[in-house]
Amino acid sequence: MEVLEKPDHLYLEVASRIESLIDKGALKIGDRLLSVRALSKEQGISLSTAFQAYYYLESKGLIEARPQSGYYVKFSRQLPFDVPAICEPTDEALPVSVDEMISSVYHDLRSPKLTSFSLSAPDASLLPAAKLNKSVIHSLRNEPDHCLSYEHIQGNEKLRKQIARLSFNWGGSLSEDDLVVTAGCMEAISFCLQAVTKPGDAVATESPTFYGIFRVMQSLGLKVVEVPTDPVTGIDLNYLQQALDRFDIKACVFVPNFNNPLGSCVPDDRKKQLVDLLAKKEIPLIEDDIYGEMYFGKTRPRTCKTFDKKGLVLHCGSFSKSLAPGYRIGWAAPGKFKKQVIQLKRMNNVATNTLAQVSIAHFLQNGRYELHLRHLRKALHTQSLKYMQAITEYFPESIRIARPQGGFVFWVEMEKHADGFKLHKQALKHNIGIAPGQIFSAQGQFHNYFRLSYGMPWSEKVEKGLRTLGELIRKQ
Amino acid sequence: MEVLEKPDHLYLEVASRIESLIDKGALKIGDRLLSVRALSKEQGISLSTAFQAYYYLESKGLIEARPQSGYYVKFSRQLPFDVPAICEPTDEALPVSVDEMISSVYHDLRSPKLTSFSLSAPDASLLPAAKLNKSVIHSLRNEPDHCLSYEHIQGNEKLRKQIARLSFNWGGSLSEDDLVVTAGCMEAISFCLQAVTKPGDAVATESPTFYGIFRVMQSLGLKVVEVPTDPVTGIDLNYLQQALDRFDIKACVFVPNFNNPLGSCVPDDRKKQLVDLLAKKEIPLIEDDIYGEMYFGKTRPRTCKTFDKKGLVLHCGSFSKSLAPGYRIGWAAPGKFKKQVIQLKRMNNVATNTLAQVSIAHFLQNGRYELHLRHLRKALHTQSLKYMQAITEYFPESIRIARPQGGFVFWVEMEKHADGFKLHKQALKHNIGIAPGQIFSAQGQFHNYFRLSYGMPWSEKVEKGLRTLGELIRKQ
């Protein structure tokens, strides 16, 4: 029998039925939809109508296509949560205050009992241990001196070439000579900050942002100007413009791609505006791009370095979130501050671990990194959706939650009277780790927030952890 | 035939003939003497007389016994050189000035053409690559997460236990909890300095000493008070006492065992005096003990930490000079400043490379380190004597040279008008690397000195290098 199609209505009708399944919870976030071919067969519609139906649902943000995998439910109106509000910090440049909370949260992460939602990093099971081990053993056996000797101060040349190649993915054109290898991204940020500031200087950063950034500023005697950050589009450029007019800001440290803890991503055109804005005032921008490769969208977001013409952007990255946290290999592309960064490295620790550098270089040379990243992105995206589904089920409706576009974490806002640090203490009694909101601000703001990592693959343990966490939040 | 012995004379007579062979150069520094048994047989004397002869020569400092190896020529009066004079620095606390010379010297150490006498480190051929590789492969395969995860911020617990055990050799009793693992000794010193000083503080150090110490001080905005150092007994306590009275010294950074570049060793009783002197004024002492295991004498020299009762000694060490420079594993035992050092590590690079820590721990647990150290000490001592012999032959008699009691380097004084940096430039044209004296002082003193490493095993290339160097010195 021939299928009679009314193109304007039929795809809408099919789409509307799928939408209603999603609304009712019959199709949950993360569920895979029928293939286009199967849908066509099942509903007795043409392939193109089936496509149109999915395309329409995708445009509404309800489902999404994943390359070589099919269509998945992405969003449900059942999700009762709004995204967190932008939080305006008090508008004075304050000296950073230390937070003992961090020690409490990160005191003992290696306990096997712990269900840890507190680390913004992938679970070890998501990392390509066997293949990377092969590269290590190859390096041990084939490199001169078996990797026992000091490496070049700027870092292993082969590794720098591979990192330079990665820059093409974000529209960059770095050469190996532009790069300085460091012991992780935190060291890169620390050296870059020291290269462009002196004690007492004011430095702008996002609010909220990674506590390590505040810690290093505190330790260097810097003053922090916190700039409010939108949970979707990142740093507020208008506020930044005002802050630049009001304070004598000497540098900025931003995480434009998948800010930790927000998961926000500054759109590429705004990155360009940001770079131009700072270039006008000759203000260096330290760009922490540690999460840039962990995007859930179709393409790698650009970086601020992509738009840097004056050498004012000090781009920092790392393999700690994507390949091997324990190897401690990161890098800086410090633009015109390269010489200062090298000097800081010379005086701090001279060279970075040779074996780790050579092994990662070998892993990348063999094309293994791109392949691994594709798997990792897909796994993280799926995990984020699974977690979100459980949160919908177990957390009270009063919470607000950011929708990360990449990275490892959810930023959760509780009711005003709730306390993230108290929640951490209570959760720890149940062997559950979270990161309280207070540690993501220099001023101890965000007391009613917490950060929840979905770096651990979905499991019963995870589900139980989220259920318990939901109960604890309700009690608050 | 029965041997008639005249005990009071016979051993003296035999000894005197051996002495004359040494004086004439028939027996050279580093040459092995006949065994006691062979000497007894050859000379028709009793074993005890042969022993007495050697014992007498040993007491005169001409020969030395090496365990399980026999007697060797240690010193020759033919050696025409005196030890360098103690150099009194100008007595003001000056801000540290940068030295571009360091970049010139350490620009390209990995060139295969270079005969490098510029690195105070063992040649890779002296390191136990095969056995250490086994430990790496074992760790890759057997450790949880294949060493991919972040390590404990204080460092791998097994490794800290092993380092604590090493402390027994120098009369210490550290526990794993006293230690913080770092990316090499330089990082340990840098963190320790930051823990006990603030910019503008005055810090006492030896003169000459390792340029890295001046660099880190400069970078931290500290002022340096240089304390003259004896080529044999190290830091001048009288001068230090005066300096403490005259300047408001907030900390000291000393290398008591085998100061680099002098090779001097502070006698253990003076170490105690030094610790007591500083304890009276509550001044922290950062002790760089990176060369402590590379002793040529019979026992491991003690450390200042051995005599520390108040937690004021921040002891720093490393495996970079003895096992694996490229692994970047060092440590600090920061006494009562442990908390600050951990905080500095947290803000700088969070954790140290996991694989390197676990592998070295495994290597040590299996007792391989002690065995390797015995071989390494013997090799270095022999090399030092071989080099000294060649220096005697090829260098002009006008030079003065320190006799290192351990470590990797000779400190050579040329005539007043000579210039170490010029010599470095000229030597580099012949593909020879040395370290000019100027870089071992904050004030650019020691222009007519240079440091010569004997870390490379003896070879024709080394001999040719020393001959050329001798010619270049003569031309100056």
Image (cartoon, coloured by chain):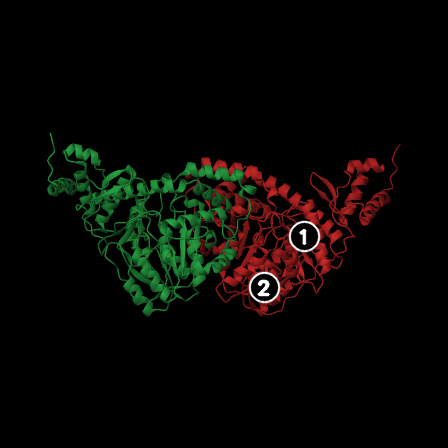
Chain colours: A red, B green
Give the residue at the far top of this rendering.
B1
- Tell whether A6 sits left or right of B102: right
Point out the frontmost of discs 2 and 1.
Answer: 2
The amino acid sitting under disc 1 is Pro
Residue B182 coordinates in the image, percent (x, y): 46, 52
Circle 2 residue: A442
Chain letter of the residue beneath label 2 in the structure image? A
Residue A103 coordinates in the image, percent (x, y): 56, 58
Chain letter of the residue beneath label 1 in the structure image? A
Q: Which quadrant holds the N terminus of chain B?
A: top left
Ranked by sequence position, the earlier of labels 2 and 1 is 1
The amino acid sitting under disc 2 is Ala
Q: Are marks 2 and 1 on the same chain?
A: yes
- Seen at 26% across and 62% down, the residue is B88
Circle 1 residue: A404
Q: Nearer the viewer, residue B449 or A311?
A: B449
Crowding at dot 2, Cα within 10 Å, few <14 / some 14-19 / many 20+, comes out as: many
Residue B467 coordinates in the image, percent (x, y): 24, 42
- Seen at 18% across and 39% down, the residue is B48
